[in-house]
Image (spheres, rainbow, N blue to C red):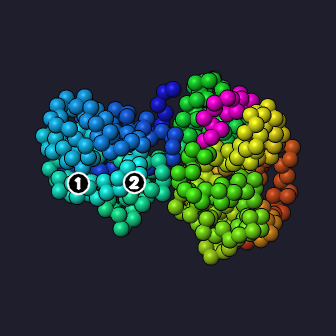
């Protein structure tokens, strides 16, 4: 698959790389697994040599042996003697960088926590001592969000304040998904919505669907539920390391959110326990959910809902984790029947989310969100505010045009409009067919 998008990230990496001729530069690249971090850093943004080191689950001495071979091959050097510690290896690289400029990429940087946590103090000590003379661009990549944030942004940690550039790599935006479908002669508004729901813009999922030429809903579901599919265990593989021993409670919370139990009170009534701490960590430490407040509400309002940020994770918790007994029994045809039965209801709110992303990409509005009143009354699917031109856009979104109701939308907006006196109000009815007209 060709390399899509990422122009801004490549420009930042190129800029950082050019600065290394003055002194050592450190860049942190953060992003969930399979979002395309490795593909990004291996793009040719540097005119100098690049050393790529992957921190796998091995002993420190075995890793150093593996790293030494890579360094010799990429920098055309001969390392005399045996290097058994990362401290010695990093000191050697910083010394080499005083005479030749190169880029050092360390992937899955957070894995040093399991191998030898003191490595981070070692890096800090050596970096501070050699940065001024070493012409090196040191890129650290990590996929465990909570650990990478702790390593670089916790004031108590040795690498706090050492990063010069930071990239938080996000999934592809809707316009890129549309481009990919068009390049594969598979674009329709319906295919775009299904592609958006089932990939969430994550590069690895997209790569697999492109490889298998699966662009329709049915063909994508066939791949997701095929024997030995990576999708089936994806939620566990991604999140258990993040959550640790408490993953069961977190998974229960996420499963309920994916099943439209989106308020704290609903979740707590089902789990019969206080989950405020779990919700806070899911949002602020792990960045897996986000809280949504009605547009125009006061910052202190307690009226809020939660949604899973990652589209595929929402699908995984709604259909794969929820029906894990069917998955264990390998009754995939039965699970397909359930997905076919319930998917339209499930993806309805993702059509809202898709339109919101398209409105954001248009950059015509200063605020975009949802609106509802206490008790989930008078819900308006999309509210877009232009505070500069004093315009207010109110949208109802449905999968089927037949279910759209203009009069009902106007009626539900009465209280909201009162908060935006003097604004020109526009009402729009949106269905799947309208994704090309935003």
Residue 92 in view (yes/no)? yes
Report the residue marked by disc 2: 113
User: Could you tell me which quadrant the C terminus lies in?
Assistant: top right
Residue at 48% x, 54% y is: 145
The residue segment tinted magenta is: 218-234
Residue at the farthest bottom position: 300
Query: Foreground: 25 or 286?
Result: 286
Percent coordinates x, y for residue 240 in the rendering: 57, 51
Is the residue marked by circle 2 packed among few (<14), some (14-19), or many (20+) residues within 10 Å? Answer: few
Is the residue marked by circle 1 packed among few (<14), some (14-19), or many (20+) residues within 10 Å? Answer: many
Q: Is residue 178 left or right of residue 343?
A: left
Percent coordinates x, y for residue 16 in the rendering: 29, 46
Residue at mark 1 to residue at mark 2: CA–CA distance: 18 Å
Residue at 66% x, 68% y is: 275
Residue 259 magenta-highlighted: no
- SS for tag 1? helix
Residue at 81% x, 40% y is: 338
């Amino acid at each position: 698959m060709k390399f899509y998008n990422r122009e801004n990230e490549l420009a930042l990496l190129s800029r950082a790389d050019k600065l290394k001729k003055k002194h050592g530069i450190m860049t942190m690249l953060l992003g969930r697994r399979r979002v395309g971090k490795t593909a990004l850093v291996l793009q040719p943004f540097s005119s100098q040599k690049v050393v790529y080191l992957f921190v796998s689950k091995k002993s420190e001495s075995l890793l150093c042996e593996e790293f030494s071979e890579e360094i010799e091959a990429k920098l055309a050097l001969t390392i005399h003697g045996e290097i058994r510690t990362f401290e010695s290896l990093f000191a050697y690289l910083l010394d080499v960088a005083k005479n030749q400029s190169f880029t050092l990429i360390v992937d899955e940087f957070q894995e040093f926590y399991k191998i030898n946590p003191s490595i981070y103090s070692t890096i800090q000590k050596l970096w501070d001592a050699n940065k001024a003379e070493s012409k090196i661009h040191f890129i650290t990549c990590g996929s465990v969000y909570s650990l990478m944030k702790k390593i670089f942004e916790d004031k108590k940690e040795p690498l706090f304040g050492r990063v010069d550039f930071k990239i938080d790599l996000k999934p592809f935006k809707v316009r890129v998904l549309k481009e990919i479908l068009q390049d594969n002669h598979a674009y329709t508004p319906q295919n775009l919505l299904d592609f958006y729901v089932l990939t969430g813009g994550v590069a690895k999922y997209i790569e697999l669907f492109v490889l298998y030429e699966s662009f329709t809903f049915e063909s994508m579901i066939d791949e997701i539920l095929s024997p030995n599919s990576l999708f089936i265990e994806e939620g566990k593989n991604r999140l258990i390391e993040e959550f640790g021993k408490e993953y069961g409670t977190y998974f229960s919370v996420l499963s309920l959110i994916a099943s439209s139990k989106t308020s704290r009170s609903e979740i707590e009534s089902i789990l019969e326990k206080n989950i405020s701490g779990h919700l806070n960590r899911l949002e602020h430490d792990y960045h897996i959910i986000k809280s949504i407040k009605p547009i125009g509400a006061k910052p202190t309002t307690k009226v809020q809902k939660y949604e899973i940020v990652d589209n595929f994770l929402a699908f995984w918790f709604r259909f794969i984790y929820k029906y894990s007994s069917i998955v264990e029994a390998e009754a995939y045809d039965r699970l397909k029947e359930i997905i076919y039965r319930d998917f339209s209801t499930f993806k309805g709110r993702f059509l809202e989310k898709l339109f919101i992303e398209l409105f954001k990409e248009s950059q015509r509005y200063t605020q975009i969100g949802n609106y509802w009143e206490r008790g989930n009354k008078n819900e308006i699917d999309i509210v877009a505010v232009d505070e500069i031109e004093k315009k207010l856009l109110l949208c109802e979104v449905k999968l089927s045009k037949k279910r759209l109701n203009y009069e009902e939308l106007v009626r539900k907006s009465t209280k909201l409009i009162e908060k935006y006196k003097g604004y020109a109000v526009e009402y729009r009815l949106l269905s799947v067919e309208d994704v090309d007209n935003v």
